[in-house]
Amino acid sequence: MTIEELKQKALSLTLQPGVYLMKDKQGEIIYVGKAKALKNRVVSYFRENSSHTEKVRQMVAHVHDFDYIVTGSEFEALVLECSLIKLHSPKYNILLKDDKGYHYIHISEGDYPRISAALQKNGGGTFLGPYVSSYIVKQSVDEVNRVFCLPTCSKKFPQEFRKGRPCLNFHIHRCFGLCQGKMGKDEYQKLIAEAVEYLKHGSLASVGDLEKEMEQAAEALDFERAARLRDRIRAIRKMAETQQVLFDGDKSLDVIAFAQNHLVICAVVIQYRDGRLTDKLTYFFDDSAALPELRSEFLEQYYAGAQDIARCVLLDEAPEDPELFEQFVRHQAGRAVTVAVPQKGDRKKLVEMAHNNALEQLSDRVQRTGREVAALEQLGSLLNLPSPPMYIESYDISNWGETGRVGGMVVFENGRPLKSDYKRFAIKEVAGQDDFASMAEVLRRRMLRYLEGDPAFSRLPDLILLDGGKGQVSAVRKVFEELDIHVPLFGMVKDSRHRTRAIVGEEGEIALSAVKAAFTFVTAIQDEVHRFALAYQRTLHKKTNYASDLKKLPGIGDARAKALLREFRTKKRMLEASPEELGQVAKLPPEKAETLWTGIHEMWGGEEPAEAAGEEASENNPKN
């Protein structure tokens, strides 16, 4: 079917809730969705000029037909949708694949066994498990080795007893120093048995027995062993404290948060069971879905297949229909489940921890630091943008009399300066020092180049930041309305000490002080665009002075001075040029070229080379 035929078919649908199934030419189901009113939802896919995400546009382009199932309520539609997604695995739905393998804790063979994590039951020794979570296996192995100060090095015992100095772990009390040969086989194996018991029955269960052993060792005047037992008891208690949720009452929690960067979204689920952090799950989505839509779809699919649902689910943001989602989770769990978006206190700290984990996971994925990812995310949220601004342009005007009025444009892509896209503008149309009109001129020329298809200006930014206040924003907004340009536009204002204070739109100022990463990022942008515009303005001012100096020499007028500066650009290069080269550029006969060469050396030859060498602009970008 064509889009128009699909639209006509959709117009005949009922306004009741239900599920729709989009199909391609082969009749394969490529998307399953639910709707409160089937007709309204399905028709929206086939309207012209609809503001769909890229993912939805791609899906619609492959739709050849659709089917639907009417349900009694929106909740029934949600349950049916999740069931059909699991059954058909449609291409354009979020599919949370359980790709986790099994993991084991391995206690090796021999007189001096080690405790380590293992992916498979290969080789000899004893294996505890299987465990689904690699995170909890690694955490447990690290914990038991730290509490019991067991060796984790590659040395072989007893062959390497007393061969070489102990490693760093011994000196920082992470290892008791088995390599020194001060513990016999029987005592070490007893220590390993205690460690395995610790793994099987938990941390605090063994404290009572250890305290009795410590007292017995002290009574037997074996103070060295008593001290080791004391340190182990302290370590177990400290580890147990760090594993506890920060507050009493909620011992079964799922904490879920999201982070977004460019076309990648990361979801992190941190699970607490019996007051302990038991697992951390990470999911990446390399598509262009809007985050609110993806959040709701993820939560539905995650809990549609969850085997162990916590009694409380903490979220960084609410799904699109919070009440429907809570009803669905309770249905899946078969008992009461609380869903909340905490705003303060210990619960809020847990959500922030999950969010920070998502930021770090995302930064690893996109090769950016967590701070850069956080800055873009905070800035997008602060300005109510649909997604973090990955490509930002910033503009500043610099004035120095009538000959030094310029505009600078800097670009930040994915949180970092993209100097190859920097541009410079000489103010041509505005008379006098009018910052508002100058900014409008620069942005008009930039957008006209975009509309004309100039490759150097082919990309529209996700955000434009002007160095200035409401006046600059209003002046540029008029240009955008005239040219039908739709790009988020804000100004950057400074305080009395010339430090970034806030972002300003036409509706007023937006404070930055409460969002540290965004504040630091915007300050860096404002400093960089000011530096770049000022550097260009100074370059033009110097060239104007050089042209005035050149015109004092015999036979050099305005045109020849400009030609010499255009060719040689700096004093240093002009001083290094031969009379023949100068004459060729200025179109002078040999005798006059010799006179020009002599005049240049008499005028500039005594200046310091370093000063002359520093005259050229640092960014190698053309004037626009």
Image: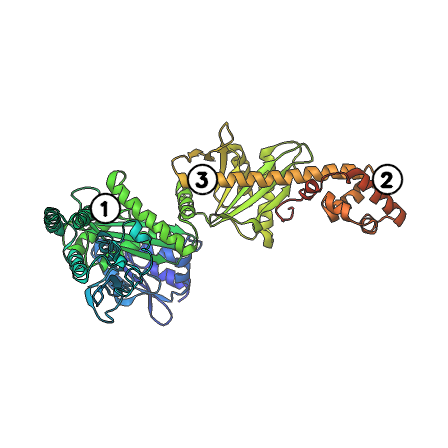
Q: Residue at x 72, y 44 (%)?
A: 570
Type of the residue with mark 3: Thr
Q: What crowding class fits label 3: few (fewer than 14 Cα within 10 Å), some (14-19), or many (20 or more)?
A: some
Nearest to the observer: residue 21 or residue 95: 95
Contact flag, marks 1 and 3 (Cβ < 8 Å): no
- Which residue is identified by label 1? 242
Question: In the visual, does 88 lie left or right of 263?
Answer: left
Q: In the rendered structure, which disc, 1 or 3, sits on the residue that comes first in sequence?
A: 1
Q: Amino acid at mark 1?
A: Thr
Residue that mark 2 sits on? 554
Rate crowding at label 2 as few (under 14), some (14 to 19) or many (20 or more) other CA atoms within 10 Å: few
| Residue 533 percent location from the top left of the image | 60, 40
Give the distance between the C-alpha atoms of the residues marked 3 and 2, in whole angstroms. 54 Å
Q: Nearer the viewer, residue 12 or 193?
A: 193
Label 2 sits on what residue type? Pro
Q: Upstream in the sequence, badge 3 or badge 2?
A: 3
* Residue at point 47%, 50% (across, down): 414
3D distance between C-alphas at marks 2 and 1:
84 Å
Look at discs 2 and 1 and give the one toward the viewer.
1
Residue 515: horizontal and vertical position, in percent? 39, 38
Residue marked by disc 3: 520
Q: Nearer the viewer, residue 35 or 492?
A: 492
The single residue placed furthest to the top in the displayed view is 496
What is the C-alpha distance between the residues marked 1 and 3?
32 Å
Secondary structure of residue under mark 2? loop
Disc 1, SS: helix
Q: Is residue 428 visible?
A: no
